[in-house]
Image: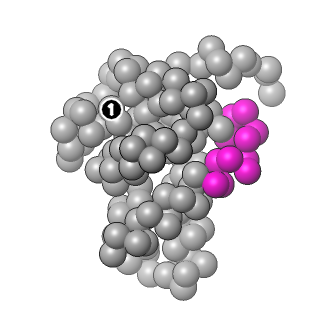
C-alpha cells in the first residue's frame, strides 16, 4: 500500500472511509445485541447511520465540546468539502454536517487512532440509546 499523508486527503475521501467504518461498528453492535433479521437490522441501523442521525450526533458532540481542535478542523474540512453528489432524503445542511461527522471518523481510522475512534463511536451509541 502506498504511503499517503492523511492530512492531504480531502474531506469527501475521509468521509467515504468514515462512513464505512462507522457503519461496520454499528452493524456489529446491533448484531451483538441479538438483532439478526436483515430488515430489522437496516431499520435499527438508520437510527445511528442516517444523515439526520449523524448530524444530530455531531451537533451534540460540538455542544459538549467532545472534539479536539484537530478533530474540529477535520469536521469543518469534511463539512465544507464540495460534493458532486446530491443529498438523498435530507437537506443540504444536514448532509454537510453528516459528511463532516464521517470525515472525523475516517481521519481517526486512517491515522490509526483506534482508541479515540472507538471512544467517539461508543459515545454515539450511548447517546442514541439514551434518546429512545
Residue at 20% x, 47% y: name it.
89
Q: Is residue 125 left or right of residue 91?
A: right
Which residue was labeled with disc 1?
Answer: 96
The verdict on residue 49 being magenta is no
Circle 1 Cα neighbour tier, 10 Å, few/some/many (<14 / 14–19 / ≥20): many
Tag 1, which secondary structure? helix
Q: Which residues are magenta?
A: 109-119
Report whether residue 102 is seen. yes
Quarter of the image with the C terminus in it: bottom left
Q: Is residue 6 left or right of residue 101?
A: right
Q: Nearer the viewer, residue 80 or 24?
A: 80
The verdict on residue 114 being magenta is yes
Residue at 59% x, 19% y: name it.
9
Residue at 73% x, 18% y: name it.
4
Residue at 52% x, 24% y: name it.
73
Main structural element of the magenta stretch: helix, strand or loop? Answer: helix
Quarter of the image with the N terminus in it: top right
- Please identify the residue farthest to the bottom as the structure is shown: 34
Amino acid at each position: 500500500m502506498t504511503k499517503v499523508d492523511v492530512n492531504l486527503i480531502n474531506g469527501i475521501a475521509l468521509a467515504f472511509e468514515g462512513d464505512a467504518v462507522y457503519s461496520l461498528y454499528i452493524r456489529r453492535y446491533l448484531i451483538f445485541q441479538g438483532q439478526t433479521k436483515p430488515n430489522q437490522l437496516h431499520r435499527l441501523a438508520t437510527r445511528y447511520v442516517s444523515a439526520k442521525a449523524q448530524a444530530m450526533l455531531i451537533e451534540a458532540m460540538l455542544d459538549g465540546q467532545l472534539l479536539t481542535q484537530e478533530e474540529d478542523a477535520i469536521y469543518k474540512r469534511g463539512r465544507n468539502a464540495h460534493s458532486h453528489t446530491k443529498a438523498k432524503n435530507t437537506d443540504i445542511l444536514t448532509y454537510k454536517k453528516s459528511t463532516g461527522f464521517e470525515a472525523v471518523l475516517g481521519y481517526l481510522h486512517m491515522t490509526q487512532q483506534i482508541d479515540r475512534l472507538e471512544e467517539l463511536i461508543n459515545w454515539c451509541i450511548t447517546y442514541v440509546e439514551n434518546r429512545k
